[in-house]
Amino acid sequence: MKTDLSHTLFVKAQQLIPGGVNSPVRACKSVGCEPLFVKRAAGSKIHDVDGNEFLDFVCSWGPMILGHNHPAVVAAIEKTLQDGTSFGAPCPLEIELAELVIKALPSVEKVRFVSSGTEATMSAIRLARGYTGRKVVVKFDGCYHGHADSFLVKAGSGVITLGIPGSPGVPEDIVRNTVSIPYNNQEILEKTLRDEKLDIACVIIEPVAGNMGVVAPRPGFLQKLRSLTTELGIVLIFDEVITGLRLALGGAQEYFGVMPDLTCLGKIIGGGLPVGAYGGKKEIMDNIAPDGPVYQAGTLSGNPLAMAAGVATMQQLSKLDFYDDLEKKAATFADKLAEIAEKYLPGQTTLNRVGSMMTTFFTPGPVTDFESAMAADTEKYGAHFRQMLSQGVWLAPSQFEAAFISAAQSQADLDLALDKTEWSFKKLAQEQKSR
Ligand SMILES: *Cc1c(COP(=O)(O)O)cnc(C)c1O
């Protein structure tokens, strides 16, 4: 595979941008190679600057559920663009997207748009603290909620990928108000929430974890979390930045039938443009400025291009059978993937899947929390990643991320990915034997 131009660009980028990238995992450090620079993407494929074509399972880390450059989304952006790119004043598209979100997400009565998932989660905890008058945020080990100070305690995604325990630059005074507990452990959850010395404002959770690799909630775990938080007057926040509009139009809350007080959205809701949102019960949302005292603002919030992309995306997702079709496609693919893994690497991998998000962990498993995810053999994942890339399949450059199925992937695309996986797993098995 020719990568000369990407290499030249990476050398130059490293002189200008820290690590040569604007988001750390993109640097591909944990998989032992250099990043490829992308020229364009369409449907299920990504094309790099050296002319290589890849079948994309990263989907821009989640947003591209319709595939890249979906014609309806492109048309909506182009049409909106004719009238200007930012007004700093309300525009009708904000109402359109708000109506779609409120209709789709069962627990959301009012919604505020921001420009990223990070902004959504940090605003949601500020609101929960302002509303309850309490301080402490409870989160779960291995969950990632963006890069705001309060969340950089045992966080997932790039924080685990790079092996950073937390982050310098985050004052102890801030993280003292964050308590991180194991995912899927009801006993510790109950003990923590009932601890009267802790002045708990909210619990924030990825209702399906996607940032330590995919980890599903144990049956009853979300229900227990809901009943405890209700009983104790603690605000329950679902960080649905990945799962919202991914597991169902109504996100994980529709999928599992558990309603949070506040919901954070991002990724898919912008259709590939920078959008985040947080919403929930009127009673809580009415505390946000200018109706209430909890401040939150944004120069580009509700940006017309981003709103247009979000509306067009949600219209596509609202089509009959969209999620049933995606589920069937993902289930068939995952079953075959697990079969191939068992054939060549018996007892050495674990495939976790919920809907169209999945991770093959290089560990016998089961993978149910941060600790069991960390048992994965990241060297082996790195080798698999490089082999797949050489064969034209673009996986996440980290063991601790999800692979996403999109509506744009055809049966032929998925069959090809399975063939390449079989080749790669077979190679890993042979190398293991010869060692
Ligand atoms: C990606 C992600 C975020 C952060 O969103 P950004 O748009 O990257 O700031 C927050 N929470 C979850 C669950 C995410 O996956």
Image: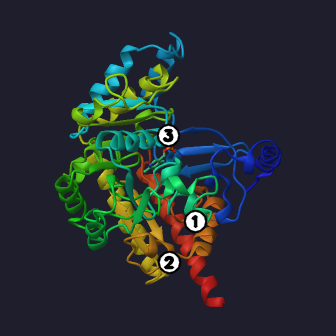
Q: Would you call the spot at circle 1 few (<14 residues within 10 Å), some (14-19), or many (20 or more)?
A: few
Q: Residues within 10 Å of mark 3 (few under 14, many from 20)?
A: many
- Residue 220 vertical position relative to residue 97 in the rendered view, above or below: below
Which tag, 3 or 1, sits closer to the chain's start?
A: 3
Is label 3 in a helix, a strand or a loop?
loop
Q: Is residue 247 visible?
A: no
Residue assigned mark 3: 43
The answer for how far apart the CA atoms under marks 1 and 2 are is 16 Å
Give the residue type at disc 2: Ala
User: Which residue does the image show at 40% across and 30% down from the upper left?
Assistant: 113
- Above or below — where is 207 with respect to 381? above
The crowding category of the residue bearing disc 2, from other C-alpha atoms within 10 Å (few below 14, some 14 to 19, many at least 20), is some
Identify the residue at horizontal 27%, vertical 25% (top origin): 99
Q: Nearer the viewer, residue 118 or 213?
A: 118
Q: Of the residues tagged 1 and 2, which is closer to the observer?
A: 1
Which mark, by number, is residue 165?
1
Q: Which residue corresponds to mark 2?
A: 375
Image position, residue 359 (x, y; %): 44, 64
Q: Secondary structure at mark 2?
A: loop
In contact (CB < 8 Å): disc 1 and disc 2: no
Q: Nearer the viewer, mark 3 or mark 2?
A: 2
Task: Say which quadrant the C terminus sits in.
Answer: bottom right
